[in-house]
Amino acid sequence: MLRIGAVIGGLLHLVLAGSAVKLALTQTSKPHDHHVEWTRKVMSLPAGKWLVWGVALGLFGYAGWQLYCAVQAKLAKQLELGKCSPAVRQWLVGISRFGLAARGVVFGAVAVMLARAASRFDPKEAGGGAKALRELFELGRWPFLAIALGVIAYGVYQLVGARYRRIRVK
């Protein structure tokens, strides 16, 4: 089941990355986002603003964790790469680190949007992955393209995980 989940996750990230590359090259795609409505519903609850802040802080933490994992490259606990040649192993670790870093950047952008929505009490400021990619596009075409390639790399990392994931049976 872990391998199947990793394959599905990898394919979904590749589709997301394809949309990001299309956005980078055409500048015409406008994402449809349901996160605004969910944020509006949460903000209408008692202490809803604080719930949105909590989710934003949780996403900031997760984004930081992704970046930490990318820097530390502690993939040996999850992946069994001993069967690969050293060159292939180095390539797989490099692409995985790049993918984890890009995913951390995207999650960080989502966290920023949620924090902005909470601080301004404006659900329209919220957004998910597609809107985060749209906002990251404002950094410029080339930085955005690097992030889009990183999301592709994360999809590859998921597929690598499906193949080389260390699974212990009890």
Image (tube, rainbow, N blue to C red):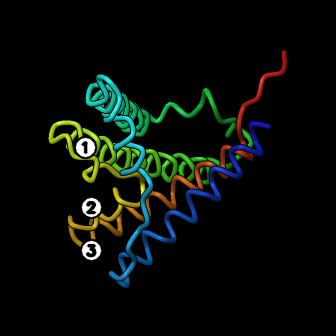
Query: Which of these two is toward me, 132 or 151?
Result: 132
Total label count? Answer: 3
Who comes first in sequence, dot 3 or dot 1?
A: 1
Within 10 Å of the Cα at label 3, are there few (<14), some (14-19), or many (20+) other Cα atoms?
Answer: some
The CA distance from mark 2 to mark 3 is 11 Å
Kind of residue at badge 1: Val
Mark earlier in primary sequence (2, 3)? 2
Sequence-first disc among 1 and 2? 1
In the picture, the disc for residue 141 is 3
Q: Amino acid at mark 3?
A: Arg
Marker disc for residue 156 = none
- Few, some or many C-alpha atoms within 10 Å of disc 1 (few <14, some 14-19, many ≥20)? many
Q: Which residue is identified by label 2?
A: 135
Residue 72's quadrant in the figure?
top left
Percent x, y for residue 140?
A: 22, 70
Q: Disc 1, disc 2: CB below 8 Å?
A: yes
Residue at 38%, 35% (x, y): give it: 42
**Mark 2 crowdedness (10 Å alpha carbons): few <14, some 14-19, many ≥20:** some
Above or below for 9 versus 137? above
Residue labelled with disc 1: 112
Residue 78: which quarter of the image? top right
Which quadrant of the rendered structure holds the N terminus?
A: top right
Q: Nearer the viewer, residue 25 or 99?
A: 25
Q: Position of residue 89 (x, y in %)?
A: 60, 47
The type of residue carrying mark 2 is Glu
Quadrant in which the C terminus is drawn: top right
Q: Nearer the viewer, residue 118 or 112?
A: 118
Looking at the rendered structure, the secondary structure element under dot 2 is helix
Q: Nearer the viewer, mark 2 or mark 3?
A: 2
SS for tag 1?
Answer: helix
Image vertical order of residue 18 relative to residue 131, above or below: below
Viewer-nearest of labels 3 and 1? 1
